[in-house]
Amino acid sequence: MKRKKNLPKLLNLQYLSVTNKTIAIGEKDFPKLYCDIDDYPDFIALYSERGLYHKTDKTCVAFMEYDNEWNGRYGLSESIRWDDQEELQRYIERFEGVKYFASPDPTISNDIHRYEIGHRIGTAREVAIWLTMNTKAITIPLIKYSSSSDFKYMLDGLEDVTVVMFSAKGKMNSGKDHDLLIEAANFTVEKLKNLKAIIVYSDSIYDKKILKMFNSALVAGIRVIIPDNTLRTRNMELAKESGRYERL
């Protein structure tokens, strides 16, 4: 009997086992994500902070580090792409008991080719789907963009989600990144009609400044939640030691 060929493997299309679990949306065929929750994270642990994955009952694990930290040769997205079951099992064991994830935060910037930006956003979606399928956790979509030109597709496939995440780290001071974040937040609030909450990852202790950046969400009745994280907690402690905290 002639053995049936494994075409996805022969054609390096094994990621389809993940993306075929949902539908494709928009000009770039981004996989559609679903996330509808009413109970939100209160702490964000980075991928490398393995000892903090269960710091609270509602800790969210996020991939907001250098790409090679979480996505090297044997990283999660590469293991998904190559269907490396041995590596994927290690990830399942690593993430056991995690309640929330943020979808990955690949580096995208205007220094990167446009085709690569779309690819990296799509790959982050693949990982988000895999995490949802293979752990008991909920994956919260992280909004990714490199410039306002990405806005036309960055929300494709997120039409039905009720919560998203933004990273405000390094974007607190006025300037290009600061203004672009506000523009992206405003666009997201306008386009995602089902949005109930925005989770913000930030190392800043100045909550009023953070909330001001997401004022359009507050005006629309959308909750803006700023969970603790290692850097934010450390900065808070330093502020208390110096007396700055009492003056906030």
Image (spheres, rainbow, N blue to C red):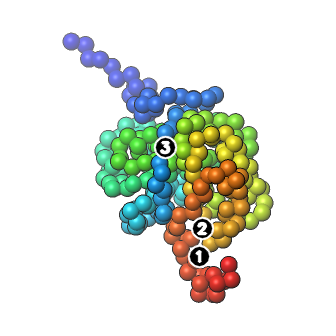
- What residue do we see at 46% from left, 55% from top? 39
Distance between mark 2 and mark 3 Cα atoms: 25 Å
The residue labelled by disc 3 is 35
Nearest-to-viewer mark from 1 and 3: 3
| In the depicted structure, whether residue 76 falls above or below residue 177 | above
Report the front residue among 173 and 116: 173
* Mark positioned earlier in the residue sequence (2 or 3): 3
Q: Is residue 164 visible?
A: no
**Badge 2, how many Cα within 10 Å: few under 14, some, many 20+?**
many
Report the front residue among 59 and 153: 59
- What residue do we see at 62% from left, 72% from top? 205
Q: Disc 1 marks which amino acid?
A: Asn
Distance between mark 2 and mark 1 Cα atoms: 7 Å
Q: Is residue 37 visible?
A: yes
List x then y, in percent, for residue 45: 47, 62
| Callout 2 touching callout 1 (CB < 8 Å) | yes
List x then y, in percent, for residue 122: 55, 38
Q: Disc 3 marks which amino acid?
A: Cys
* Mark positioned earlier in the residue sequence (1 or 3): 3
List x then y, in percent, for residue 55: 40, 67
- What residue do we see at 56% from left, 56% from top? 199
Count up the numbered dots.
Answer: 3
**Badge 3, how many Cα within 10 Å: few under 14, some, many 20+?**
some
Give the secondary structure at mark 2: loop
The residue labelled by disc 1 is 235
Nearest-to-viewer mark from 2 and 3: 3
* Mark positioned earlier in the residue sequence (2 or 1): 2
Q: Is residue 85 left or right of residue 143?
A: left
Please identify the quarter of the rendering in which residue 65 is found. bottom right
The residue labelled by disc 2 is 203
List x then y, in percent, for residue 155: 62, 39
